[in-house]
Image (tube, helix red, strand yellow):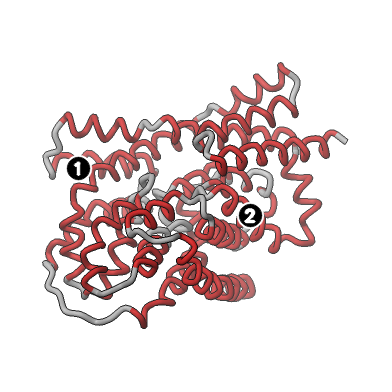
Amino acid sequence: MDAWLNLLAFVASVGLVAGFVLTRRLNVGYSLALGVALYGVLSFSPKDLVDVTLASFDLRMLNVTTTLVLAITLSYLLQRDGSRIYSGMVSLGPRAAAYGIPATIGLLPMPGGAYVSAVIADPLYSRLGLDARHKVFINYWWRHIWIPIWPLYQGVILAAAILNTTPVNVIRWTWPASVAAILSGLVTLNSVPRVSENGVPKALVSLWPIALVAVLTFVLPLPIAVASVLILYSLVERVGMRELLRAFKHGLNPNILLIIVGSLVFSEYIEATGLNHLLSDILGPYGPVAVFSIPLIIGFATGVEFSFVTLTFPPLLNLLNGYMLALAFAGGHIGVMLSPAHSCFVLSAEHFRCEMRSVYGYLFKAVAVEIPIAAALIYLLMTL
């Protein structure tokens, strides 16, 4: 009976989080903190609540917090290279740059990053003669193709922490979801005209910090890899102390810190109550459908890129084996990309002066392509 009460408490807490996020009465961090607190109060005695909460503040939480603070700090500093990124990408061809600019900026996990890529790519999109809804779609979709695989994305880092593994191991299983997102993002390629524009190929060198993070992730613990690149970039680019402190201030965003702490405490609560085992027993016969659809629903309801990880991975933990993890990320990606509450969608539409509803034609086409590609890839890999 207690297990079913825990399930009701979980539904109530998720509903509370989604309600606050959708009505925008509270930001995601505070909403998640309240939802987690509600679940804890409904599920534990006062003494157990304190014990389980304290147990969640461990080395895992320290590693995740350090990594995300450093990643956001580095992302803030790399914004200064926007003009060089534009010039370098255009040297590959304007059509490639149209998709490549938001995809490259997408490697920088910063809140509202689609606005940054929109500002950088806007002159090129105008030169290509794209209408407003096409601009929004390309900028918005390609900014988020890396959600399942980029080791600096909050979702990947938090998934690794919840699953008690490394980001590299997460990526090992989730890459089909990213491949599906990339291929589905090409649904508008034929309507992007060919034009000529000169760029500076050597400006692509400005992407070296991103490339170095990707390489070091496979040989060093992620916090050390990001810290090393941050220090090296600051020295090479002669970043002043004032600018560095300003960047760290962005990295120490209270909302992000609350999300990290809330996610890992929530995970600890769910494990302590055994809710993950209950859901595994209930959903076991429908595993693939549940693992795909529940993150999709939560992602759509909240519009936050990593909410489907923080709210659904702890209770679905026992089902997230192997390529089932790719299904979860594919569902979560589709959910957040279709959500009208997604801040990047809102910011892109505002910048390009476009009605959000007019973009859904492109979004639905992309999703209609993404689902069968992801399903086919995952099925093929599971049967090999």
- Residue at the extreme top of the image, as rendered: 47
Residue at (13, 69) in percent of width and height: 199
Mark nearer the N terminus (1 vs 2): 1
Q: CA distance from mark 1 to mark 2?
A: 41 Å
- Reading the image, the residue beneath label 1 is 232
Which tag is nearer the camera, tag 1 or tag 2?
2
Is 307 placed left or right of 383 in the picture?
A: left
Is disc 1 placed on a helix, strand or loop? helix
The quarter of the image holding the N terminus is: top right
Image position of 245 (left or right of 307): left
Residue visible at 54% across and 27% down?
Answer: 57
Q: Amino acid at mark 1?
A: Leu
Return the mark for residue 204: none
The three-letter amino acid code for the residue at tag 2 is: Ile
Tell me the crowding category of disc 2: few under 14, some 14 to 19, or many 20 or more residues within 10 angstroms, Cα based. Answer: some
* Residue 104: quarter of image: bottom left
Residue 131 point in image, percent of width and height: 33, 71
In the displayed structure, 30 sits above or below 118; it is: above
Query: Which quarter shows the C terminus?
Result: bottom right
Could you tell me residue 65's position as x and y percent? Answer: 43, 34
Say how many tags the image has. Answer: 2
Task: Give left or right: position of 232 versus 42.
Answer: left
Q: Secondary structure at mark 2?
A: helix
Residue 6 position within the rendered picture, expressed as x and y whole percent measured from the top left:
77, 36
Q: Which residue is mark 2?
A: 297
Q: Are marks 1 and 2 in contact (CB under 8 Å)?
A: no
- Judged left or right of residue 227, residue 358 is right
The residue at 15%/38% (across/down) is: 239
